[in-house]
Structures are given as C-alpha cells and as structure tokens.
Image: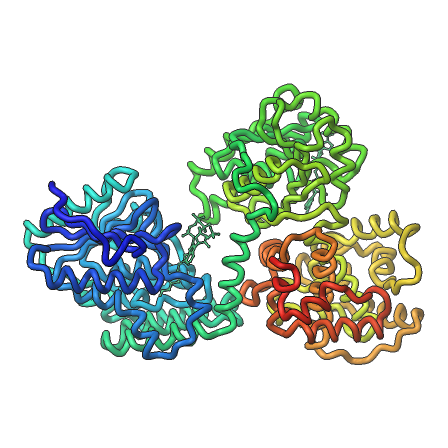
Amino acid sequence: MTEQATGSTGGSATPLQYRQIGDIAVLIIDNPPVNALSLAVRTAIAEAIRKTDADPSVKAVVLIGSGKTFIAGADIREFNLQTQGPPAASAGRAAYDAVDASKKLCVAALHGTALGGGLEIALCCHYRVALPAVKVGLPEVLLGLIPGAGGTQRLPRLVGAELALDLITQGTHVEGSRAAALGIVDELIPGAGFDELLDGAVRFTRQALEGRRPLRRVRDTHGKIKHVNPEVFAGFRDKNAKKWSGLLAPWKIVDCIEAACNESWDVAYAFELACFLECKESPQRGALSHIFFAEREAAKIPGLAADTRAPPINSVAIVGAGTMGGGIAMAFANSGIPVRQLEMSEEALQRGSAIVSRNYETSVSRGSMSRAKADENLRRIRGTLSYEEIGSADLVIEAVFEDLGVKQDVFRKLDEVMKPGAILATNTSTIDIDKIASATTRPESVVGLHFFSPANVMKLLEVVRGAQSSPQTLTTSMGLAKRIGKVAVLAGNCDGFIGNRILATYAREAEFLLEEGATPWQVDAALKQFGLPMGMFLMRDMAGLDIGWRVRQRREATRPKHLRHSRVADLICEMGRFGQKTGAGYYKYDGREATPDPQIEQLIIDAAAKAGIERKPIADAQIVQRVLIAMVYEAAKILEEGFASRASDIDVTYVYGYGFPRHRGGPMYWAEQQGLAKIRDKALAYHEIHGDHWKPVALLAKAAAAGSWKAALGR
Ligand code: 3HC
Ligand code: NAI
C-alpha cells in the first residue's frame, strides 16, 4: 500500500488532513480534543468531498478521526454563538449532505466515540467499520437537543423504530460489539489504535471496491421502518410521560422517528431540522449545555499548577461497613478497584457484607447488572478486622459514626499504619476536617470525600479541602472521582460544606413558610411542580427527623437567639413522629404511602399563633421563589467566603447531589436567567420582612451590578 499524497485542505491550521493511499482518499479530522464538528470542520469535509468527487484517481474515501477518537459530535460551544435562522441552519447540514451524496464509496472508520453529529456523519457514509472499544450514540437529548443531521431518520432505518426510540431518547452509548450486532457498524476491526483502524478501514474499502459493492445509502433502506404499528409511538409517549414532564427534546425525537416511518425522506428530514431548531432555541438547551461545561469546569482546581502530580489509586480501604461504607465500597468495586473494608467486629462485617450482596442481587434482578459482573464486583470487596491489613492501600476512606472522638481515634490508627503518601479521607457530613486531620502527623494527606447516599448510585462527590490538604491530595481526589463515575466539586471546610449548608438555609425558609400560611403538602407540591424530585418535607420524613432534632438540641445553647426560629420540626419530634420509619412525621404513612395529616396542620397553626405570626394564603409561585432565592442567597455567601470556587460548581452540586432539575441549569444559572438584580431586590425585601437571616450579601449586589456571577467573581 503506497501513500501517494499528503496534504491538508488549506494550510496546517485546517482541521482536516487529506491523504491518498493508492486510489483511496483518507480524510483525517484533526480538531482536538474530541474532533468536534465545528463549522470549520464541516466546511473542510464538504470541500474535501467536492475534491474527491472531482478527482478521477480517487475511487473511495475513508473518513477517520485523528488521535484517540472519531467525532464526538457538533461543537457544543457554537450553539451558544449561532443566532441564524433556518436557511443558514440548513446550511449546517451541507457537510452531511455532501457525504451522503458522495459519488465515491465512503467508509467511516470509528474509534473512541462517534457521538451526535459524529455518528450522523458516519451514517451518511456507505459503510462503517470500527475498533471494538468504540462507543457510538446520539446523546443530543442530554443537551436538550435532538439529532439535527438525519440521526432520527437514519438510525431507525438500521435498527428499527422501537430500538431507535430507546437509544435516541436516552442518549445511549452503544459499544462496538452491540453496534455491530445491530448493523450500525458493518465490521469490527480487531485492534486498539489509530494505525490498526486505518489499515483495517483501507482493507475493508478495497474489498468493497473489488467486490464492486454498490453505493448503499442508509437513507434508501426502508425495510425496518415500513409498517410500524402507530401504537408503538402512542405507547412510548404514554410510558415516558411522567419522566419527560417539562422537557422538550424527547417528545420531538418521538415525533421525528414517527415521521421517518410515515413520511417521505424529504418531508421527514425537513421536519427533523425544524424540531432541531426549536430545541436549539429553547431555554432548556442553554441550561443543559451550561451544566455540561460546568461539570467539566468543576474538575479543575483554580490556582493549582497544571502539572501537579496525581499518583494513581489502585487499591482502597474503607473503615466502617455501614450505609455509606457499603455504598462507597460498591462504587470502587464497580470501577474495578479492589477494596478492603475494616470493621469493629466480625458481626458488623457480616451485616455490611449482607447488605452489599443484597444490593447486587437487586441490580441483577432488575437487569441493570449481569450475574457475572455482580459476582466479580462482590469478589473485589474483602473484609478485615486488622488495621495492619489495610496499611498498603493508596487511599483510605473513613465512614464510621458521625462523632469527632470516634473519627479522631480512627485517624490516629490510620496515621500509624498507612503507607507514606496514602490519602486519608473522611466521609463526614458535618465535622470539621481540620479537627479530624489534627489527630494525624500528616494533615497534608487528609481530605474530605463526601459521598451522597446511596453512594454507589449518587453521582456527586464533594471533595472537601482541609486547611493543609496538599495540591497532590486534592488533584488525586478530583481525578479519582471521574474514574469511579462521580462528578467532583471542590468544597471548603465550612459547616455543611456546599450542599448541606445550602439545604439547611432553604429548609429553614420552608419551615418559616409553614408558619406564614403554607402546609407541608403545598410546599412539597410546589417544589415538585418546579422539578425537584421530591418535596422538602417528604424528603425529611424519608431521611428521618430524629437526627436533625438531636443536632438542634446539641446546638441549642449556641443558637443566635435574636434570629427567627421555627419550633414546628421540634414539636413534631416531641410527638414521637420521626418520619416514615415511625409511620408519621410531617405526613402520616401507610407503609410508604404519605397522606396529609390535619393534626400537623393544626400543630402548625398553633405554633404560628404562639410565635405571633399571622397566617395568610401563599401562592405556589411565592413558595418556589422564596425557597430558590434562599438557595441562591446562601450560595452567594459560600462563594463570597471562598468555600466554593465558582457559581457553576454550586449548580453542579445541586444537579448531581440534590436532584435540582438539570434542564433548569442549577440554582445559580436559574438566578441569572431570572435576572440577578431581581434576585438581589427580592433578598433585600426578605431582609426587611424577615430580619437578619437575610442580611445583604456583598457578592450578590456585585453580581447583580455586573450582570453575572462570573463577572463578579472573575471566574
Ligand atoms: N463540543 C465542544 N467541546 C466538547 C465536546 C463537543 N461536542 N465534547 C467534549 N468537548 C470538550 C469538553 O468540554 C472538554 O473540554 P475541556 O478540556 O476544555 O474541559 C474536552 O472536550 C474533553 O471532554 P471530556 O472531559 O468530557 O472528555 P471525556 O474523554 O471524559 O469524554 C466525550 C469525551 C464522551 C466525548 C464527552 O466529552 C461527551 O460526551 N461529549 C459530548 C458529546 C455530545 O453530546 N455530542 C452531541 C453534540 S450535539 C450534536 O452533535 C448535534 C448534531 O445532531 C447536529
Ligand atoms: P452507619 O451507622 O450506617 O455506619 C457506621 C459503621 O461504622 C457501622 O457499621 C459501625 O460498626 C462502623 N464503625 C463505627 N466505629 C468504628 C470504628 N472505630 N472502626 C471501624 N468501624 C466502625 O453510618 P453511615 O450512615 O454509614 O455514616 C457513616 C459516615 O458517613 C458518617 O460520618 C456520616 O455522617 C457520613 N454520611 C452519611 C450519609 C448518610 O446519608 N447516611 C451521607 C453522607 C455522609
């Protein structure tokens, strides 16, 4: 095989290299880091296809990505810049249409990821070959979009309407072997690197040419979308109605796939573009794209040298095999990292191990994990009673009782046995990290790793920075999160860190709203309507009211007495109502079924009267506004005090840890959309009415004047 020509479509800065291997033109997309389909890339592809069409020495084209990946989709950043209407937007399809109409046989060679527009352009090619480790998919829905370049039209033609509905509305990444079995990929090329893929693609292309395979366009295949029962679409909409409440894109995807089955190519393809543009202009798209970048930004620690060393974590020890210890162990085991779990007694170990086994059984019975995988993961978790046996782990996470003395005792022992350089982490949710670190001789290695329950499921990981946590400890911790599928946010060492500190503030305001005229069920319904997964009071009932009660009792002596304080929660606990587990809390329960309780309404009315508060009807919108502004207000204080780095970190915390509706972008993004000046004015009005809980925050005033958090903070 001889390489006849090498070049690019116009200078070294262009994102496409053009090579020729015999009579095969090789177009290499070169737009690091993920070869996103920017306008420049699309223009270069269209130009290159014009060139291959016109060049008689070219018989076929291979389209491949340089580096580690094919094309990860359209360049998401460009969606925020583009304001053009339909004509220019349809021009955005020019590259796809050029490949689809190519006179020369086109083969896409896929590795890494072929997502969104990347898969769409591959579907415009006549054939697709791939390395086995490839992942392909149309994840646009996760960004509030639908595939806009024929994805909803071509994928159903290959895999059938029903499977396409699932894959595209969930944005599923499909692995190589499944993609091949489904016919998305025509042949898997054994190997792992670019060179093997290119060699295999050229070989495949040559065979295709020699076998004189006709140009087979996906758009011309109809077998799998003919005669689809209309009930399929109605049923799919019904099944997902609750899940998609408030969303736009998934509904549009169903409409587009239905159109693919019922309309001509031209009509359905134009319809897809119209739906794509509608989604592109929606506020949801802006919010989801904000969260996409915020998540990636959160992983970066401001002020830390980019070359800070982050030694790999290959083994983990966990002290405590209770609720959190078990979940954390599963999170590591599921990512292939061996875990030693230390407990106080054989009995406690057995108890913890039984819960973990039960959780894996549930995953197997629900079909979310294979039996073999569950067994393999379970085998990675081994119990011990001996500190000596955990000393060689790269990282140890303490998850024992929430008691400073107990934790300091554990850290003293860890300091004795852990190898030099090991990270010593605590999962505490309320205790000062520095006090825990002071029990060791190596506070630079101590950090908070605050997982959320259930730790094997919840994505958020607050990495809590102690006064002396070293850059290396922090960098390793942030990197580790990604490895175990978590989203990390760096938090400072304040009471409640980021998430729970904000929660305490808006929970307080929700309690005040009860005294002012709302009921628990009205507050819960209003917040649920906004998009939170569960109302405030239902959540408290589920978590149990007694723990918070004990904390309040402990802190009663130091509570600032000049500030407003609601007695409602204490009164409920004094009745022995600790939530779901005792059959009553804010609600009464039949099993898990919650019902509003007139007795609690009366309790609230009496408490308000005693506190001299006149109750008045409160509109749902006012409830949502008060609760959300309380979130934003506390978050602004956290930012001002330096316990969070960026406003977007708060959004990530709330979306991944507290179920804030992703399509609203998080509380800080929400505030910007409302207008920060309006939020500031509301907070000032609350200060007038409700007193010093709402003392003005300078950063909120600054952000309101500057128009954004970023402008006020400089990041
Ligand atoms: N556009 C612009 N930038 C992108 C991008 C995209 N599509 N995908 C990733 N990036 C950037 C990230 O922001 C990050 O930048 P940074 O280093 O400055 O923070 C960098 O590329 C690396 O990304 P990750 O940290 O996420 O790298 P991973 O290796 O963990 O993941 C990935 C790679 C799986 C490709 C992941 O980035 C991803 O899921 N990207 C989005 C894929 C997607 O949604 N594609 C569809 C886009 S919409 C579309 O195609 C519309 C079409 O139908 C017309
Ligand atoms: P848990 O009570 O379920 O488990 C604690 C376990 O630690 C028990 O199995 C106990 O036997 C063991 N243990 C106690 N002292 C020990 C010692 N000296 N050595 C070895 N093992 C010891 O508690 P849970 O809920 O798992 O909480 C653990 C930690 O995680 C606490 O610090 C808590 O604040 C924090 N946390 C809890 C969350 C939750 O939702 N439960 C969420 C986030 C953090």
- Is residue 328 something one can see in this rendering? yes
From the top left corner, tell me how far across and down residue 396 is, in percent.
63, 31
Q: Is residue 550 above or below residue 673?
A: above
Residue extending farthest front:
11
From the top left corner, tell me how far across and down residue 45 is, in percent.
25, 61
In the rendered structure, the answer to whether residue 212 lies left or right of residue 246 reads left
Choose top left, top right, bottom left or bottom right for residue 586: bottom right
Q: Is residue 579 above or below residue 195?
A: below
Q: Quarter of the picture for ligand 2?
A: top right
In the rendered structure, the answer to whether residue 79 lies left or right of residue 454 reads left
In the rendered structure, the answer to whether residue 462 lies left or right of residue 130 reads right
Count of numbered marks = 0
* Along the viewing direction, whichever of 476 and 389 lies nearer the viewer: 476
- Is residue 162 something one can see in this rendering? no
Choose top left, top right, bottom left or bottom right for residue 535: bottom right
Q: Residue at x 59, y 43 (%)?
A: 304
Q: Residue at x 29, y 45 (%)?
A: 177
* Along the viewing direction, whichever of 593 and 264 lies nearer the viewer: 264
How is the structure coloured here? rainbow
Q: Is residue 20 above or below residue 52?
A: above
From the top left corner, tell me how far across and down residue 31 is, in percent.
34, 53
Q: Residue at x 71, y 52 (%)?
A: 642
Q: Which image quadrant: the N terminus?
A: top left
From the top left corner, tell me how far across and down residue 514 is, in percent.
80, 70
Q: Which image quadrant: the C terminus?
A: bottom right
Q: Residue at x 76, y 64 (%)?
A: 698
